[in-house]
Amino acid sequence: MDSITSFITAINDIVWGPPMLIAILGTGLFLQLRLKFMPITKIVAGFIMVWRGRKAAPGAPGEITPYAALMTALAATVGTGNIAGVATAIAVGGPGAMFWMWMTALVGMATKYAEVLLAVHYRETDDHGEQVGGPMYAIKNGLGRRWVWLGGAFALFGGLAGFGIGNMVQSNSIAGALQAGFGINPWVSGIVMTVFTGFVLLGGVKRIGAVAEKLVPFMCIGYIAVALMVLGIYVDQIPAAFALIFESAFNPVAATGGFAGAAVMMAMRYGVARGIFSNEAGLGTAGIAQAAGQTKNPVESGLVGMMGTFIDTIVVCTMTGLVVIVTGAWSSGLKGAALSSAAFATAFPGFGAQFLSIALAIFAFTTILGWAYYGEKCWEYLVGTSVEIPYRVLWTLFVMVGAVMQLDFVWLVSDTLNAFMALPNLVSLLLLSPVVAKLTTDYFAKNRI
């Protein structure tokens, strides 16, 4: 087993090494240039489309509103990466990692916009009369029969990765957080999560969307509100925190306290890697959810979809990062959720750690729901709609398994499969970029938001 673990670790180091990070960032930058930085200049327009998306266009194909589709995508992305991932990036790469997370998000908005636009433009109607899409359909219908194998590869990697990083890893995080914060036995947490997951999934995408559009805004607003309370307590430290972030992004950080010090490359590597892990720009997953949205125009879906990256990283991740820095916890030597917990506990002794446990549990539970839909559509692409009920039952059972097991190996395999998902998606984004540019130009030539 050790030799297998070592082998997969070596593969993971390669696929998530500098070449992959450069490929993801490079693709995002290329799309930003191709779109003439439209995703950045149209951020306000994106929020307007999100607001409008609460209601579907009359007669538009799709199962849920564009807003519900965005919330489903956010359910999958706003998770442990926003709490544990950000803290780890700062603990290892220094405060400068936050700057590189922001840069990843800004170029990632173009990536996410293109992913969603192509997913909606090339979506199909399945045997149940529902709209389905994603990178696998964009590859099949946009690149032609010669590339069908690449779409199948994406679906296979996504279908397998989901059971790990979107399911067992998340339920394990929930069980661990509730045990640490409240002493709840993992078996109890597992049973409760399994029941709730089964109830939501058996209702399909409409129930997932209904739960997501209520739970995701609640959890995001609640988390941001408490983070702002912490920043209010340490308001005098905020200017220094921003100065430290920008300085550390371009200069090495010396060792201090429990912090071992970090070179600029460390800040860049961990900032980019954790940013991608958090917002999933480049993986192609958001397009799967947005393809179910009721819309008549893929550009409008893309504008809604790109806001997921902005909300996830520029807003939620920034809150975590600033709290970790202004409280001084970043140099404590702690990592992951323990570091975030210590930061909130510094501001609110006796309450902060418990709040973070609840936040982490809710964030991770919504990730289970969002990834459940992603995985289902991947397997549906491979074997047809008959897989739906068996898949939902199996997915629900794996929630229980994840809650009570040690998952270091599962995490490693899933993380590697995530990288393999990104490769077919990046290829399709580059080859279909002329389609993205043309649809965007045609839309804005006729419409003003």
Image (cartoon, rainbow, N blue to C red):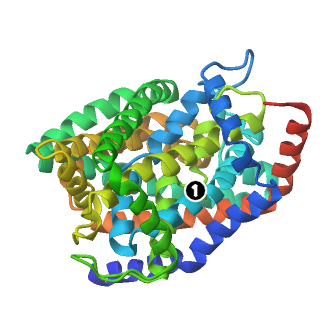
In the depicted view, which residue is nearer to us: 279 or 401?
Answer: 279
In the depicted view, which residue is nearer to us: 383 or 319?
Answer: 319
Relative image position of residue 255 (x, y in whole percent): 30, 82
Residue under label 1, please give it.
105
Q: Secondary structure at mark 1?
A: helix
Q: Quadrant of residue 139?
A: bottom right
Q: Residues within 10 Å of mark 1 (few under 14, many from 20)?
A: many
* Above or below, comparing residue 425 to residue 268 in the picture: above
In the depicted view, which residue is nearer to us: 44 or 229?
Answer: 229
The reply to whether residue 348 is visible in this rendering is yes
Relative image position of residue 314 (x, y in whole percent): 52, 50
Please indicate whether residue 83 sits to the left or right of residue 311 in the image.
left
* Above or below, comparing residue 251 to residue 287 in the picture: below
Relative image position of residue 268 (x, y in whole percent): 51, 74
Q: Quadrant of the N terminus?
A: bottom left
Residue visible at 81% across and 50% down in the picture: 436
Callout 1 amino acid: Ala
Please indicate whether residue 13 sits to the left or right of residue 139 in the image.
left
